[in-house]
Image (cartoon, rainbow, N blue to C red):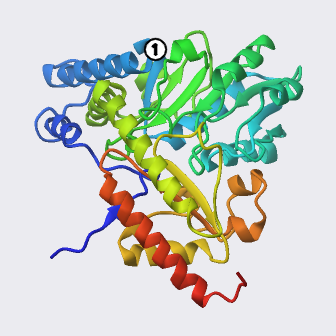
Amino acid sequence: MERKYVYADNAATTRVLPQVLEVMTPYYLEEYGNASSGFYSFGQRARAALEDARARCAKMLGCDAEELFFTSGGTESDNWAILGAARARKGKKHIVSSSIEHPAVRNTLLKLQKEEGYEITWLDVYENGIVRVEDLEKALREDTALVCVMFANNEIGTIQPIRELVEVAHAKKVPFFCDAVQAVGHVDIDLHELGVDLLSLSGHKLHTPKGIGALYIKKGMWITNLIEGGGQEKRKRSGTENVAGAVGLAVALEFMCGEEGKRERARILALREKLIDGLLEIDHVRLNGDRERRLPGNVNVSCRFIEGEGLIMWLDIMGVAASTGSACSTASLDPSHVLLAIGLPHEIAHGSLRLSLDVDNTEEDVEFILDAVKKTLEKLRAMSPLSI
């Protein structure tokens, strides 16, 4: 009998949906033309597929097709949005962001600070992991070039009041960029209603293969290019277009943002609540981040008297794939900057556990995870030199 193994790290990446792979396959094997080779029918069909995918993605996101630019994923989109918007506003050298941004945003801002003389104001997120609107109001200045606040945090899952923050920024005529990599497909987003000027997303967080993403650039918003070359994507993002990826992204968005996807969100939310309730019954376990304003599948807890890395390794042995936090910083031995930002001391932040559920997870998975976590914590605490 095959040993059960539960994948509960969907915030890191997701399984490709069968219907996504099915629709992509012809663009690798049959219709593999270059979308920029438009003088013959093979390339024209690829171009038509690309533009059809763009229109379908835009419809699901609530924007116009000409406002959506395909990229290689979230990191590229984040870098392009920040560097492009900042450099387009010459003479303005101040940026406001939150203290819990993803490394793709945080490190890009630090690069601007170190290499180009920008000043960054990091907004507090308090114990619940949420930015306060009044703090943004106080932080804005005459020389503020950009506000960067993520839609939902990749570690603790907290959802920010983006619409209210956008209104504050726009009142001072400051553009607003939102990293929505963790949010798109998992919460309702209508870009024109939301009001942001720039928004990033990544396909592999919502069941496409890795290597496709997009940047929304609101009509009238000008940013400089990040990648120069052959002038693809309306001369804004050069590089041979990933037609298969774009087609797959359209199908994934249609599923995740459609009625079936919304029903799945409600089911996943119920699983999340069951998982949180069970974990909080264990001694010395606390929930990180706001319980209500968080992604449907996100659970992040701190377990005292253990090291998170040991917990993850033992859970793997027990048959559960989990993480301590961002998949982009797992090689670091430093405690999570997100957990430190919500006020956790180093010794508690080191014992963090992130479990992220998605469409493949079941109630039986939750029971299995709870049993594995309880047994693993008992084992590790019995061996720990730390006092309980």
Picture residue at 48% right of the left edge, 34% below the top = 201
Outermost residue on the front side: it is: 281
Dot 1 corresponds to which residue? 63
In the rendered view, would you say 303 is above or below 270? below
Front-most of 100 and 158?
A: 158
Picture residue at 73% right of the left edge, 84% below the top = 387
Q: Secondary structure at mark 1?
A: loop
In the rendered view, would you say 317 is above or below 86? below
Question: In the picture, which quadrant includes the C terminus?
Answer: bottom right
* Residue 1 point in image, percent of width and height: 15, 76
**Image quadrant where residue 380 sits:** bottom right
Picture residue at 39% right of the left edge, 67% below the top = 320
* Residue 168 point in image, percent of width and height: 77, 18
* Residue 321 point in image, percent of width and height: 40, 65
In the rendered view, would you say 35 is above or below 369? above
Left or right for 57, reference 289: left
**Image quadrant where residue 115 sits:** top right
Front-most of 18 and 369?
A: 369
Within 10 Å of disc 1 (Cα), the crowding (few <14, some 14-19, many 20+) is many
Residue 218 shows in this picture? no
Left or right for 356, reference 245: right
Amino acid on which the number 1 mark rests in the picture:
Cys
Residue 27 shows in this picture? yes
**Image quadrant where residue 23 sits:** top left
Left or right for 277, reference 91: left
